[in-house]
Image: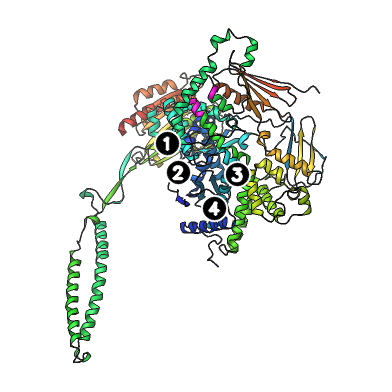
Amino acid sequence: MAHIIIDRRKNEKGKSSVNRQRFVKRVRDQVREAVKKVIRDGDIKDIVGDKGKKVRIPGKGLDKPQFHHADSGGVSDNVRTGNDRFTQGDRIKRPPSGEGGEGGKEGSPDGEGNDEFDFHLTREEFLDLFFEDLELPDLVRKSISKIDDFAWKRAGFTVDGNPSRLNVLRSMKMSKGRRIALRSPKRKEIKVLEAELKLIEEEKLPFHIHANDHLEVEALQERQTEIIELIANLKKKMKAIPFLDDSDLRYNRWEKVPVPTTQAVMFCIMDVSYSMGEWEKEMSKRFFMLLYLFLVRNYERVDIIFIRHHSEAKECDEDEFFYSRETGGTIISPAIQLMKDIIDQRYPPSEWNIFGCQCSDGDNWGEDTGNVTHMLTQQILPIVQYYAYCEIDKSGGMDSDIWAYYEKVKESANNFEMAVVTDVSEIYPVFRGLFEKRERSVT
Amino acid sequence: MKKCLIDSGQEWTFDFIEEVYAEIKEVAEGEFDLNTYTDQLEIISSEQMLDAYAAVGMPVMYSHWSFGEQFIKQLESYKRGYMGLAYEIVINSDPCIAYLMEENTAMMQALVIAHASFGHNHFFKNNYLFRQWTDAEGIIDYLAFAKKYIRECEEKYGIDEVEMILDAAHSLMTYGVDKYKRPEPISAKKEEALRKERNAYNQSQLNELWNTIPRTKKKKKTEEDEDKYPKEPQENILYFLEKNAPRLKDWHREIIRIVRRVSQYFYPQMQTQLMNEGFATYTHYKIMHRLHDKGLMSDGGMLEFYQSHTGVVLQPDYHDYRYKGINPYALGFAMMQDIERIATDPTQEDRDWFDSQYWVGQGDPWGAIKFAVENFKDESFVQQYLSPKIMRDFQMFTIRDDEKDPKYEVTGIHNKNGYKIIREALAKQYNIGYTIPDIQVTDVDIWGDRTMTLQHFMVNKRPLDLESTNGVLKNLSFLWGGYPIKLESVDTDGQVRAMFDIKEDATIVDIFLDDD
């Protein structure tokens, strides 16, 4: 049998994807911890972005035990190379902490240690774990991680379609090309024949021909008529080439493409007074992130504005927002006022979908609360799509300075939602109204 | 002179591969008289190479998370540039499949063809271990059968159920081999046909074995000895489970069988890495030189070849951060070259060392090398062919780690006193009977609580790793139907040094220290 050479490059790639999935499932617990860390440490946009996420998991716990010798104990000999100083009988100090047979043949099987190792989760894998924690209903999960809102967009041409999609220009181009292609060999032939004809006609001129060349003249004449006939025939054939053939027709091709609806701006307002600790901030971050996820899924462009406040409000970047701490009392109204100002200056409601979300532990300067509800109902809620308030309180809250007031706001508006969060899994319900509304409007 | 085929930095084409294959074949068969399976060269992309890596190099393999782990690790380290892809994978099958990566330059494709399709291929076809242990013709079909069978099990019984069996069986994978009996050849068709028959037979055997309850009352202690089971210690633990485990279903047994057969297929590769890589490297080295001599490869191509070749056969010193033990390519290649040297032009030292072996100075290097390839495995190869010159060239020395000694001791270096010591130690290092703990099933309490007892026959009093042993024994207990498992580490004096007791998922470990 002779050897064979096979090009397998076109074969399926990703043969390992099933195995990969199984592995990720297997290490789910470790990965979940790693995902939490990513959420804690990363930027909102980055976390939610398209890129895979690097996670680090401990190599231990991947249960692949094999019988093997302990690293030390008993007697073992090891041959090494590159002796540059030893002679027989030399005694060498052991390396510390039983790191004994390093480099030898033994050690754990497959040459694997128990070291941690890093790998990149795909976006799907990452979001899957992210959502699992938030206990999103499947429907919502799907709607965020997959894009299912489509519009038709031009995408090249196809050879069949209905007449209304006929692309005339492209079809004519094809037709022209085909005609040129089909005619040119005939045209060439005609050219050759015509040249010959010309030659014959020149030959026939009297001074070229001797008197007794009768036979030759006859032959030439015969050829002449033959050529004329051939040329006529070819010209006829050329004419018969159709101007437009079925194979020329080109139709516009349309393709489904996802369409996010224009643009949105998201205001993240957070109380950064000293009562907001690490845990509270992490909860807030998850809360903001979920809204962001929802927004990037639905809008083409999403701006995020971070407003931090204690007794004063300030617009800042994400880093400062989550990581710097300040002390002082809490007054909420300046933050709401700042949001309003920013909207007025930069985000006209006619062009932007505006979303607000506010996280706080519920404290407010007593006399300010009336102000806040007034501003919300009068100035903010009429121009925003949705405003969500999240009270973060391990002990269950609902007795805070602003809770009762906000409940009244909620009664009077249908685009306001609020919740107390004592655990990550309680974040989602704040948005339930938002997602449900959207689901309905999409279908 | 023929036209030059290979230049440096040149890209390959299909025509090139055809041509260069023909030239290499002419050298390999016409001049070196290599005897190979038919070649099948497959061009693949780097992603596919990563896929192939992860599935233990096989083109067809059943699904398991551990292959996914392997894949992810390799992908990550490849991405970060820690690891170049091995430029070849070759499969012991007939036809012999070798992968050529599309990224390779023309020179590299030639190198891979010489190395894999002729070097490894000749080794697979001629080495006695491969001939006895593996069935090159049947393996791909068998793996296809295994993949299909396991997928069907997953559909029927659920992925988790199948995974539990596979995990458990995998942890005993190195104990799925009959080290002394020659296995039957495998055939996918026959396998499928025989499966049902085997199931019925197994079941009847099991009934025989476990149908003891009514008899126990009549039995007396003395008679029990006659009924000791198994009669002889069993080294093939997976086989023993497949045939005797009390609670397994037919498909459990079939999966254990699959793991066992795959393990068996790889068994010769574990024992011949040094020789196999050494021979393939020697082969490509010789072939590439001949191509250069014949004007088929330019000087530039030769330089490119050397750059790659010297990287492959690099042996870092023990204190070098790159040191990862002895590089089988380096030592294997050096030993093959050394055999060539000794066969053609031996020194007095060689004559003394190799006594009066017939091949020394006979002037037939290929004959001597092919004889070695056919009749040895790493351990015996080192024992037979490691010369003082190689030990000097590699500056070898042995270090003894004795737990009773607070320090390491250098027991031998590359000098007259040390040669034999080093040779002994190195041969042992390649002896899997020495590196892999020798553990066998010695007793099953068929009259009582079905406890399975295993013995670990210690070498040099080397103990087992506690944590992993515990893990394996739990898996073993799972396959054994949840009945108790006992494992004793016994030293050469017959003294029990350690005892593992697995009962109802709890483990008790006793370690008996030396009195002195």
Front disc: 2 or 3 = 3
**Secondary element type, mark 4:** helix
- Magenta-span inclusion, residue A390: no
Q: Amino acid at mark 2?
A: Lys
The part of the image, by quadrant, that contains residue B380 is top right
* Crowd around label 2: few <14 · some 14–19 · many ≥20 (10 Å): some
B17 in relation to A360, above or below: below
What x and y, as percent, mark residue B20? 52, 58
What x and y, as percent, mark residue B206? 52, 19
Residue sitting at 58 percent across and 7 percent down?
A: B217
B392 in relation to A216, above or below: above
Quadrant location, the N terminus of chain B: bottom right
* Crowd around label 3: few <14 · some 14–19 · many ≥20 (10 Å): many
Could you tell me if the residues under marks 2 and 4 are in contact, i.e. CB atoms within 8 Å?
no
**C-alpha span from label 1 to label 3:** 70 Å
**C-alpha span from label 1 to label 4:** 60 Å
Q: Which residue is mark 2?
A: A13
Q: Which residue is mark 3?
A: B127
**C-alpha span from label 2 to label 3:** 34 Å
**Residue A366 shows up from this direction:** no
Q: Say whether residue B132 is left or right of residue A356.
A: right
The answer to whether dots 2 and 4 both sit on one chain is no
Q: Which residue is mark 1?
A: A266
Q: Which residues are magenta?
A: B243-255
